[in-house]
Image (spheres, helix red, strand yellow):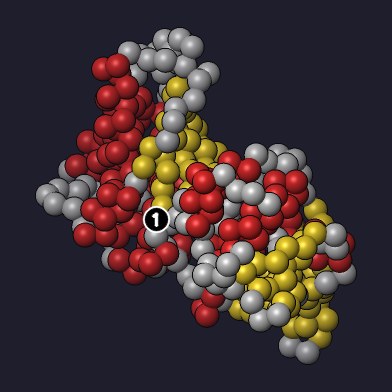
Amino acid sequence: MTLKTSVANTIEAISPETLSQYLRARGWHEAGDFLGNASIWHHGEELEVLLPKSDRLRDYKTRVCEIIDVLELSEHRDRQQILNDLLLQPTDLIKIRIDSPDIIGGTIPIDEAVRLYEATSKIMKFVASATVQPRSVYRGGMFAEVREYLHELRVGETQQGSYIINVLSPIMREHENFGRKVNLFLNRALTAINTTTKYVLAGSNIDIFEQSVESGVSSNLCDALLEVGNYTDLQDLSFRWQWSPMWDAPAIAKEKLALSKQTFPVLKEASKLLKSKDIIRKRSETKIQSQTSDRLTPISGKVIGLTRRDDAAVASVTILAKIEGSDRELQLELSESFYAKAVHAHLARRKISCYGEVVINGEAIAVRNVRDLRVV
């Protein structure tokens, strides 16, 4: 195989570790060693690739190109898209969509664009601050973690239709996955805003917004959202998450959340309320999104049932596993990427292993917050 110079230089920047992470996240599994220089990876019964163990091997670029050729066929995606995923550090994509009749052909006035990007930066800043420590209002300087995260944050190309801002949010594995926690906190905060707003519109007192502080809602976040919500004739503001293809998607997060036009007058009052308070939650209260595998229950079993609705954010899988010496049926709530692995295990008649929170309700046993699911 002859490589063009630009492609060869790009391939050289992809490490064996990055490739192995990508393959594992896409449902491939390591099947063995090849002559001490490479590992054998399988996907299903038909697909196989050889992954070099070192980028110093003479044929490293050629072998990586062969892997990308196989991925292009198996994923039905353009090789450039796959290369982009491999070259980026593990990054989640947050698509912020502004829907308004004032948007023409996917364009907006330049002064409005500047204001929207500044508001987007504030949204991410104050959600990141809540990830460190939830407060009703933030004053003064930034936390060190927030400053570093914002430095790594990027914005991709916009999209037409409605005006869409693409925020590239790094997972930041070297900092205990801080970026992924921020993305989850944004998901959690917007969920709390939607839920609390419905209560207020139904007649509840605005004071119930105090309860949403621990979910990441602050007066600063409300103000930043209002800056976007003040866009002329705004009909809808929606957030959609595309989780990194090199990192397992969280089962506990919603894929899309939207704030309707009726939300913003409530946010204005909520911001006033939270400014008048001085609510600070302890840092330990933010850890529900950052549990590690050693704090969860290890689970292993055979897949015996698959259930998935087209409109559901999560799918359900039933496995047969040993619980206190007896075979029991466990119901697992899985994200799309984990569900794909469970389907593969079912078809291949193999077991799956994972970590999760076991919840027992009478005879029924459910497993939630599933992590590190693998086919074994």
Q: Who is closer to the viewer here, 265 or 114?
A: 114
Amino acid at the residue labelled 1: Gly
Q: Say left or right for 32 vs 214.
A: right
Which percent across, then down, holds residue 55?
53, 67
Residue 203 visible within the image? no
Q: Who is closer to the viewer here, 232 or 365?
A: 232
Which quadrant does the C terminus fall into? bottom right
Which percent across, then down, holds residue 120?
33, 35
Name the residue located 72 percent from the left edge and 77 percent from the top edge: 34
Q: Farthest residue toward the left?
A: 140
Which percent across, then down, holds residue 180?
44, 56
Residue 95 visible within the image? yes
Name the residue located 66 percent from the left edge and 81 percent from the top edge: 36
Secondary structure category for the residue under label 1: helix
Answer above or below: position of 147 versus 117.
below
Q: Quadrant of residue 358?
A: bottom right
Answer above or below: position of 161 versus 325.
above
Q: Who is closer to the viewer here, 161 or 321?
A: 161
Q: Say left or right for 317 vs 123.
A: right
Q: Say left or right for 203 vs 32.
A: left
Neighbor class of circle 1 (other Cα within 10 Å; few <14, some 14-19, many 20+) is many
